[in-house]
């Protein structure tokens, strides 16, 4: 009985956690594959070029200079949503212009400013494009004048 109990304890101590890890791995992989299929991302997406945006901004200097920023963006959407995107384009462009106009010109020119701009634009574009989901935003061209 003592040897049997030790064998069960050893099996339970080593085999059970390994089996649980294996099941967890299978479930996680199944969920991540289903996520990509359900949301249509991967090979079924396309980049859609938005019109160029030119926004006048406060330069953030004490002498109240202004600057202009020209911005070319591409958004990644599902292929099936591309035909509906022009319906939401005015709202998307409005949200882009208002978001960029609220930003400080000098902050955007600093290192990391482009990353913060892209993240903020992705959020704004997703709000403007609802119910279409935008997977990512690519800044094609960013010019400060």
Image: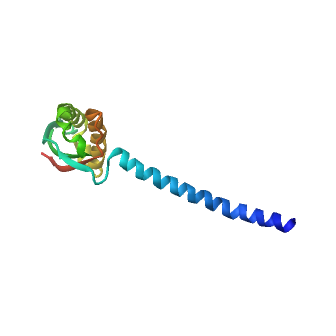
**Residue sitting nearer the eye, 16 or 109:** 16
Q: In which quarter of the image is residue 19?
A: bottom right
| Horizontal side of residue 36 vs 55, given as left or right | right
Q: Estimate the x, y position of residue 52 in percent, counting from the top left.
A: 12, 42
Q: How many labels does the image show?
A: 0
Above or below: residue 27 compared with residue 7? above
| Horizontal side of residue 21 vs 32, given as left or right | right
Above or below: residue 29 compared with residue 68? below
Q: Estimate the x, y position of residue 84 in percent, counting from the top left.
A: 20, 36
The quarter of the rendered structure image containing the C terminus is top left
Q: Estimate the x, y position of residue 71 in percent, counting from the top left.
A: 16, 44
The quarter of the rendered structure image containing the N terminus is bottom right
Q: Residue at x 46, y 50 (%)?
A: 31
| Horizontal side of residue 84 vs 130, given as left or right | left
Colouring mode (rainbow / by chain / secondary structure / one colour): rainbow
Q: Estimate the x, y position of residue 17 in percent, counting from the top left.
A: 64, 59
Outermost residue to the bottom: 3
Q: Residue at x 72, y 64 (%)?
A: 11
Outermost residue to the right: 1
């Amino acid at each position: 009985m003592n040897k049997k109990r030790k064998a069960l304890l050893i099996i339970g101590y080593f085999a059970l956690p390994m089996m649980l890890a294996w099941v967890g791995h299978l479930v996680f992989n199944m969920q991540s594959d289903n996520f990509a299929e359900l949301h249509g991302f991967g090979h079924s997406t396309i980049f859609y070029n938005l019109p160029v945006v030119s926004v006048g901004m406060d330069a953030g200097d004490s002498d109240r200079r202004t600057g202009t920023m020209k911005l070319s963006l591409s958004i990644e959407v599902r292929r099936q949503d591309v035909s509906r995107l022009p319906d939401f384009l005015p709202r998307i462009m409005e949200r882009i212009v208002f978001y960029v106009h609220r930003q400080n010109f000098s902050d955007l020119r600093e290192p990391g400013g482009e990353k913060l701009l892209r993240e903020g634009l992705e959020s704004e574009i997703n709000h403007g494009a609802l119910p279409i989901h935008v997977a990512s935003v690519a800044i094609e061209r960013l010019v400060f004048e």
